[in-house]
Image: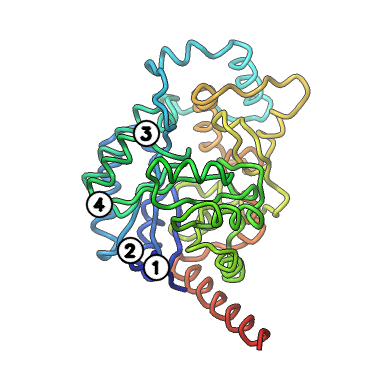
Amino acid sequence: MRTSLCDELGIEHPVFGFTPSEHVAAAISRAGGLGVLGCVRFNDAEDLDRALTWMDENCDGKPYGVDVVMPATVPKEGTQIDLASLIPQEHKDFVRQTLLKLGVPPLPDGEDGEGVLGWLHSVARSHVDVALEHPIRLIANALGSPPADVIARAHAAGVPVAALAGKAEHARRHVANGVDIVVAQGYEAGGHTGEIASMVLVPEIVDAVDVPVLAAGGIGSGRQAAAAMALGASGVWMGSYWLTTAEYTQSPLTQKALLAAGSSDTVRTRIYTGKPARLLKTRWTEAWAEPGAPEPLPMPLQNILVSEAHLRIARSDDPSVVSMPVGQVVGRMNEVRPVAEVMADLLREYGETVERLTKSAR
């Protein structure tokens, strides 16, 4: 499993592994892929710097990348307090009452409910500042093209830029903005995702742009990776599948919920960030779909609204209320295994699939 991207980025296999865990990202890089660390969970630039320093020391010299969350246009953004004042009381009351109904305990004494601020443009910019101080090999943006000055800074540092796209028109716009790699993220993917399934989306985007395209959404096996390559992709972008690896130790509760879920146990909703994202279907997501529930707020207000709720849910011991982005491939995530084993199985099955198809074509 090798394409021209491997030579360009110095990796063995065109398997790009997005993850919020530096331990998982490093393991993906050591296994021959490109570990991509999601920066959104880091509120403090120093914390991100420590995580990337750890990766510098634990990737065995293998390349890695980062993923940030920022819109192409700079929003008018005040402080966290100013933004919080824009949240309607109705929404605050709904969240408080829902947590009470679901039996989610309050945070321990002394722990604040600030939550994740990485959705804020200013925080995402600090992530870029820190990342470019490290030997990263890729900056990916979950919200499409980053601002023009960010792309220029990355290119000046010799770092390619990737952007996610849910439509061919988005991909063309990204390339026109200077993006080097397009991630075609299908409807079945976890997190922010559009309305077109990967089987349709990937060849549409491959035909629309003249840069490498990575297939994302519904990939958790060598057969699915081979299908992506057959559609014209230059590699695969996998996020959900790493959440049940042994190196992902951030939330045992989340892993318990994911291991028990099937492919139909996800929902695409705006309740996580304000933009459509696929989440694990739980009592928390169902509460937002009940009659009388308020409409989710736009980004970043929705994330600010639910930030403390997500912290409280993460501290609980009830997997039925977990709030976690994950794709429909969760139905294949049935056991906890080391990253190296997952990668080895993917490559083995990919090789077997290509060989089978080659033989059947003779």
- How far is disc 1 from disc 4 in space, using C-alphas? 17 Å
Q: Earlier in the sequence, mark 2 or mark 4?
A: 2
Q: Are marks 1 and 2 in contact (CB under 8 Å)?
A: yes
Badge 3 marks a residue whose secondary structure is: loop
Residue 91 position by quadrant: top right
Report the side of 56 relative to 231 (left or right): left
Label 3: few (<14), some (14–19) or many (≥20) C-alpha neighbours in 10 Å: some
Number of marks in the rendered image: 4
- How far is disc 1 from disc 3 in space, using C-alphas? 27 Å
- Identify the amino acid type marked 2: Glu
For disc 2, the marked residue is 8
For disc 3, the marked residue is 147
- How far is disc 1 from disc 2 in space, using C-alphas? 6 Å
For disc 1, the marked residue is 4
Quadrant where the image shows the C terminus: bottom right
Q: What x and y, as percent, mark residue 16? A: 44, 59
